[in-house]
Amino acid sequence: MTHRIMGIETEFGCMIQSETIQTQRVKVSPEGVAARVRDYVFKTLELGIPDLHYRDWGEPPGNGGFLFNGGRLYIDMGHLEYATPECANLFDLIAYDKAIEHIITAILRDTGLSTHVAFYKNNIDHFTGATFGCHENFQARRDVPFYRIVIPTLLPFFVTRQIYAGAGRVGGYDDILEFGDGQYSVDDFHGYQISQRADHIVTEIYEWIQFSRAIINTRDEPLSDYTKYRRLHLLVGDSNMSEYATALKVGTTALILDAIERHYEIHGEKLPIPNLDLADPIAAIRHISRDTSLRWEVDLQNGSTVSAIDIQREYLNFVQKVLTELDETAEWILTEWETVLNELETDWTLLTTRLDWAAKKWFLDALVAEEKLTWDDPWLKSLDLEYHNIDPENGIFYALESEGCMRRVITDQQISDAISNAPCNTRARVRGYLMRNLKKQKMPCIVDWHHIYAGQTECYEMKEPLDISIPKAQKWLKILKLRQRM
């Protein structure tokens, strides 16, 4: 794989047991709990440095901050959100994605909140219709035409990727005010669908997240050298509990970017995969998710009908053809990608130990049959939610994992290391190093992804995502210290 930085942003849901609040007269709200967890991270555990400045109109000082592991924790619209550090290694990213779950769970136990508070790594609120995001970020080359090559090539991939990246859900939802075609309403779908975000995606591309939930957010904010890089920012993905599903989701995307950039070097602006444009990407993403037959057939602009599996095979073949020099991680991705597509075509139950939607469907199908339930039973929505409970003692996913029913791709030790240590091969290492030293010197600082301000106006630039020069950072600290004495 090409060394490119990748990251995941996860928004967590929070629920408080109403019975406990009533009996113990506990006055607490989900927003208050989220803020308490954030404060515990920065003030009690001292895992990072809180913001001293306004980052945006909705992010005042103290709303969040950067962690010594290179990531960022903050409050967004009342809920807790975590961004992993920049990772250049796929399995490092999985460890950092999981690290925050361990931190939150430990805090809830330390504070006694675990008896009546739970955090969920999912994308939907069955009761209000709200959706929580899981955003992926990939460094991309500036010289490869974004709107003419990258976006047209990637859109069919993102629409169909849910067949192995979906987290699964019970029921459906229609953003009528945003989508407005009247095809679905919140109550007319009572079955099981494979993606949580599919119902909430209303357009293909859009620049502003707040106004239209798109597959790809096109805001040009590279957070690095603007002349060399873009940032591919995705809104379409589900929050995966499965380490394997997360690795496959991110890994396949990274390999396709590698292949697109390599193809551009050889063929210029010739489209890498022609004749694969979907007739209606938004209708297709909903249809695939809701297709209970699991055939996942969609219409193309050329009038033909193909399956999502066939579309994914086109991308797999494209990557295999273009990328000839593969490292161990790339080999793993290609092998698992092909295996998953083959098994989806044969029997989806072969994937219940790897894919979230398959594991959840297998579990709920068994319950429906045993208890003679219908899919509109509220119990099923509750169990759907509990699959995503991040507490290992209460969550259904972790119960399956503890019984050896879910395949892992990293170890608990890797997750433990990721809690307080930054990745060694990206600028996150330098950021973490500078933050620790500035905190030790009790020197106020303003931290961002691509720079740190300290002292009066001293700025350390981190425009190169893979620049890990500690000596350069040490030199800057020495100069900063000398100027403070002047």
Image (cartoon, rainbow, N blue to C red):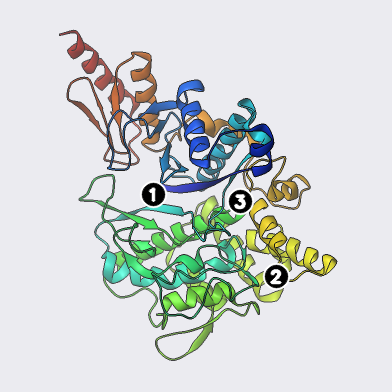
Quadrant containing the C terminus in the rendered view: top left
Per the model, the C-alpha gap separating discs 2 and 1 is 43 Å
- Residue 224, placed above or below residue 291: above
Which residue is most to the right?
370
Instruction: Name the spot of residue 76 as percent of width and height, x first.
Output: 41, 44
- Closer to the camera in the image, 393 or 433: 393
Per the model, the C-alpha gap separating discs 2 and 3 is 23 Å
The residue at the point 56 percent across, 72 percent down is: 289
Numbered tag placed on residue 375 in the rendering: 2
Instruction: Name the spot of residue 426 as percent of width and height, x first.
Output: 39, 38
Is the residue marked by circle 1 packed among few (<14), some (14-19), or many (20+) residues within 10 Å? Answer: some
Looking at the image, residue 151 sits to the left or right of residue 45; the answer is left
Q: Amino acid at mark 2?
A: Trp
What residue is disc 3 on?
Answer: 241
Looking at the image, residue 476 sits to the left or right of residue 180; the answer is left
The residue at the point 49 percent across, 55 percent down is: 250
Instruction: Name the spot of residue 424 as percent of width and height, x first.
Output: 44, 33
Q: In terms of sequence position, does the residue under pointer 2 or pointer 3 come before the other?
A: 3
Please state which of the two labelled residues, at mark 1 or mark 3, is closer to the viewer: 3
Q: Amino acid at mark 3?
A: Met
The residue at the point 39 percent across, 61 percent down is: 257
Q: In terms of sequence position, does the residue under pointer 2 or pointer 1 come before the other?
A: 1
Looking at the image, residue 28 sits to the left or right of residue 384; the answer is left
Which residue is most to the left?
486
What residue is disc 1 on?
Answer: 4
Tag 1 secondary structure? loop
Please state which of the two labelled residues, at mark 2 or mark 3, is closer to the viewer: 2
Is the residue marked by circle 3 packed among few (<14), some (14-19), or many (20+) residues within 10 Å? Answer: many
Q: Is residue 83 visible?
A: no
